[in-house]
Image (spheres, rainbow, N blue to C red):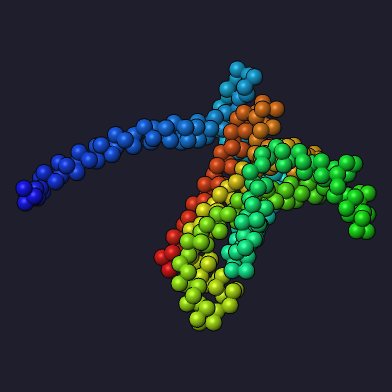
Amino acid sequence: MGCFSPRPLSEEEDNVVRKKNQKTIGLYLFPALLMVIVILYLPIFINLYESFFSWGAMSTRHDFVGLANYIKMFKDEVFYVALKNNLIFTVMSVIFQIGIALIIANVLECKFMRKTQNFFRSIYFVPSLLMVTVVGIAFKMIASPSIGVINPLLEWIGIDASKIDLLGNAGSATFAIAAMSQWQYVGYTVILFIVAIQNIPAELYEAADIDGANAVKKFFYITVPEIKDTILINTIITVTGSIREYDEVFVTTNGGPGYASETLATYLYKAGFRNDQMGYASALAFFIFIVTFIIGLAQMRGYRLDDQQ
């Protein structure tokens, strides 16, 4: 008893067991793989196929037009306005949700902030729990020249606000909506960065203290390199989310005034569901997919090259 030990498998028996295990693994993975193909990849190819046709939900016509929808897209002035607005959202989101959020997270993890850390975490994180619709309607009321509080506040500090309409002015609408978006989501990335920073070994900071490194050097030479995985993921999520920006614009200005605050997603919606140009909307949708895919791929590629060095 207790002295029995199984004999080692021969090479042939080991191959049989390995093949059996591979079949079992494949059997378990197949349903999930099928769902991913049907729900994710199949619609992408269907959308690409439909972008080569002129068709509408209210029409029986389904005419092949080749690249006409894409040619129309690149000649469309509104498309370039929407693309510029998405770029504004992207730049502001990277600055605030990555750069500023990382600095805030680092400050909250400092020793002198330990007593009030939980309070400030809640202050920053709560806005991200609110519905975009609620935030958009509230901001629309706050920015209103007639019933809002921003213009009276500007008047109180001596600025003439009689001609200021943040959401009604073509030059400020996009920036105002982007600022609202940063207020809502910067706390979410702050929490993600805090969690990542807390996983950094304390010994690294202790060794830096012994070497006489100041807070700035510890931030750039320890904190940032140690959480680069989290920075990459947050950047991909932030950038691709900015390219697909829809909710905030739809709730606050609906792309107005005129087309001043239009984004690719809101323009796609109007082309497809208001103008019944489903082929053109499919071309816009595929363009959004290609842009987000290339950006994500480039970021991952850049990260791998940096990691190899």
Q: Nearer the viewer, residue 77 or 290?
A: 290
Task: Name above or below for residue 181 compared with residue 271.
Answer: below
Query: Which part of the image, by quadrant, shows the C terminus?
Result: bottom left
- Any part of residue 58 in sight: yes
Residue found at x 81% / y 50%: 171
Q: Is residue 224 left or right of residue 107?
A: left
Q: Nearer the viewer, residue 202 or 114?
A: 114
Give the residue furthest to the bottom. 211
Give the residue furthest to the top. 60
Residue found at x 55% / y 79%: 213
Residue found at x 61% / y 25%: 55
Q: Is residue 188 left or right of residue 48?
A: right
Residue found at x 49% / y 75%: 206
Q: Nearer the viewer, residue 217 or 26?
A: 217
Task: Name above or below for residue 298 compared with residue 202.
Answer: above
Task: Name above or below for residue 106 compared with residue 252.
Answer: below
* Residue 185: image location, x then y, percent: 64, 49
Q: Nearer the viewer, residue 159 or 41?
A: 159
* Residue 149: image location, x then y, percent: 86, 47
* Residue 38: image location, x then y, percent: 44, 31
- Any part of residue 68 in sight: no
